Image (cartoon, rainbow, N blue to C red):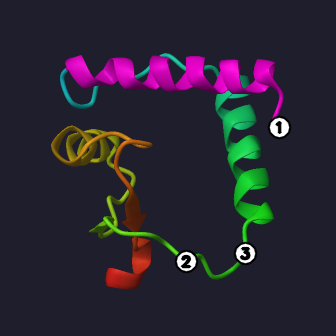
Amino acid sequence: MGSAQDESWVDGMIDQLLQARNRKPGTPVDLSVQDATSLCNQAREIFMAQPMLLELGAPIKICGDVHGQYTDLLRLFEYGGFPPEANYLFLGDYVD
């Protein structure tokens, strides 16, 4: 990743996923298996390239596990601001 074309594609995917903001919760987002797989693979590359310990700057919003509930994630972003304007730390299963 890193090219302008890759970044443009990712931005398009984010825009497509954010269309769910104005829909009833549970309404599927039209995303192909190929696009979802490619998005996951690119995210994995970014995560794997990061150090195990991240030093995060304030201010930051600390969130628990959203258990895969996409509408809950969107609600958090609506309330606290969308990245990159707002910083988040998701604790995931550490809080369960």
Disc 2 designates what residue? 55
Residue 11 inside the magenta-drawn segment: yes
Question: For the point 30% across and 69% down, which residue is it?
Answer: 62
Question: For the point 28% across and 39% down, which residue is it?
Answer: 74
Locate residue 50 relative to residue 88 in the image: left or right: right
Q: Tell me the crowding category of disc 1: few under 14, some 14 to 19, or many 20 or more residues within 10 angstroms, Cα based.
A: few
The nearer-to-camera label among 2 and 1 is: 2
Whole-percent x, y for residue 61 in the image: 28, 64
Disc 1 designates what residue? 1
Whole-percent x, y for residue 46 in the image: 73, 53
| Residue contact between numbered discs 3 and 2, judged by CB atoms under 8 Å | no
Residue extent of the magenta highlight: 1-23
Question: For the point 63% across and 82% down, which residue is it?
Answer: 53
Front residue of this view, candidates 42 and 84: 84
Locate residue 9 relative to residue 6 in the image: left or right: left
Q: Tell me the crowding category of disc 2: few under 14, some 14 to 19, or many 20 or more residues within 10 angstroms, Cα based.
A: few
Examine the image and state in which quarter residue 66 appears.
bottom left
Question: For the point 69% across and 80% down, which residue is it?
Answer: 52
Specify the principal SS of the magenta part.
helix
Q: Tell me the crowding category of disc 3: few under 14, some 14 to 19, or many 20 or more residues within 10 angstroms, Cα based.
A: few
Residue 52 sits above or below residue 40 on the image: below
Quadrant of the image containing the N terminus? top right
| Residue contact between numbered discs 3 and 1, judged by CB atoms under 8 Å | no
The amino acid at mark 2 is Glu
Q: Is residue 69 visible?
A: yes
The amino acid at mark 3 is Pro
